[in-house]
Image (cartoon, rainbow, N blue to C red):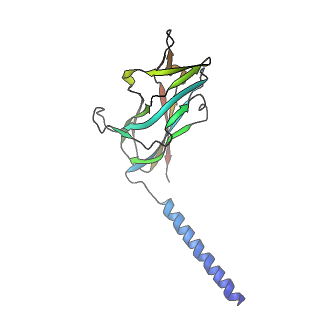
Amino acid sequence: MKTSRNIKILIIGLLTLFLMTSCASELETETFENSSLITVKLQGTPSTYSRANFEIIDVQIRVLEDESDPNAWVSLNTVNTGIHDLTKITDNTVVTLVDFEEIPSEFIYNIKLVFGDYNTVVENGLEYVLDIAPEYDNASVNIVGKQLISNKVYDFVLVFDTDNSIEMSSEGNANLNPKMSTEMRLFNLF
């Protein structure tokens, strides 16, 4: 009786081990044929302002050369929309805006941050509403110019130069002239 119990335990253990290894190998061999994974993160630079709040409502990529084409810009699944204080996300801190989204492996011309209406800075205890010039159309566009390759992970970090993006006028107005750079890291899935 003790022997049959040990055999049952051994058989159950072997079945469990077999099922676990077959599931693990399935996940390891998953490929993204004709597509890539993309992440987009936001980071600020050290600033003289005590707060620099920016409302991010969308992240888009341009996939067509003709920017005026209605299908040129594609919205990504932005997971962290809302107001972000860029003075708090500097150095090694980032905010993930797009998290491992699968997109077709095609040429990306630009990445664009689309701003909402609530953009402010605080200087010397006074809060200023940031006016965005009409030519920026509530967005900051960065050149990428990269052909995506299938089965790769692209990690884009948009580094927002906080102080150089804000212009204080002599009349006491604050204007936003977005200045950002893009860092890209490429990872292999396998």
Q: Position of residue 2 (x, y in %)?
A: 72, 88
Q: Position of residue 42 (x, y in %)?
A: 52, 35
Q: Position of residue 35 (x, y in %)?
A: 39, 50
Residue 143 placement: quadrant: top left
Q: Could you tell me how many numbered marks the image carries?
A: 0
Q: Identify which residue, 81 or 159, lies in the foreground.
A: 81
Q: Position of residue 5 (x, y in %)?
A: 68, 85
Residue at (39, 38) in percent of width and height: 61
- 170 is higher (above) or lower (below) than 166: above
Residue at (55, 22) in percent of width and height: 121
Quadrant assignment for the N terminus = bottom right
In the displayed structure, does residue 25 sit left or right of residue 144?
right
- 11 is higher (above) or lower (below) than 181: below
Q: Can you name the residue that lies furthest to the top here? A: 170
In the displayed structure, does residue 7 sit left or right of residue 24?
right
Q: Identify which residue, 149 or 36, lies in the foreground.
A: 36
